[in-house]
Image: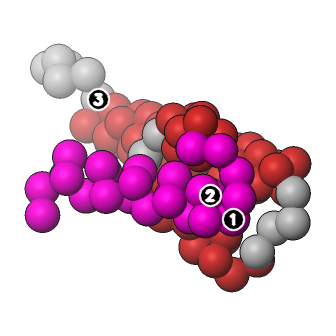
Amino acid sequence: MSAPESWKEAYRELIGSIVKMGYPEEFGQVIAKNLGSEKTMRRMTAYLHNAKPRSAEEIADEMLAIMSDRERWIKKKEAEEANAKYNELLYFGLGQDE
């Protein structure tokens, strides 16, 4: 399955789970669009199946927590990459002959 297809599948599964819980499809679409990535949508779907939240507020809170975790992970990876480049610069210099 290609990446776009698996993303679409995760999107449909998340919305379907939310609709099965009795919420409008539009609510599911908003949650899925805010999460954005396949991994975060699958994480949210797993949360819905395991935690069985009792309100839309609990679902929205978890969406925000997942989004926050994702943003924190992205910033960590960016910092690691910048640090690796800085260390490379310290080790190899600017590439100029001395």
Q: Earlier in the sequence, mark 2 or mark 3?
A: 2
Query: Would you name the residue on which mark 2 appears?
Result: 18
In the image, residue 80 above or below residue 90: below
Q: Is residue 28 left or right of residue 41?
A: right
Residues drawn in magenta: 1-25
Pick the front one: 22 or 32: 22
The answer for how far apart the CA atoms under marks 3 and 1 are is 58 Å
Residue 41 locus on image (x, y percent)? 50, 55
The structure residue drawn at horizontal position 58% and vertical position 73%, both measured from the top left corner, is 46
Query: Would you name the residue on which mark 3 appears?
Result: 93
The structure residue drawn at horizontal position 66% and vertical position 70%, both measured from the top left corner, is 47
Q: Is residue 69 visible?
A: no
Q: Is residue 42 visible?
A: yes
Q: Is residue 95 left or right of residue 48?
A: left
Q: Secondary structure at mark 3?
A: loop
62 magenta-colored: no
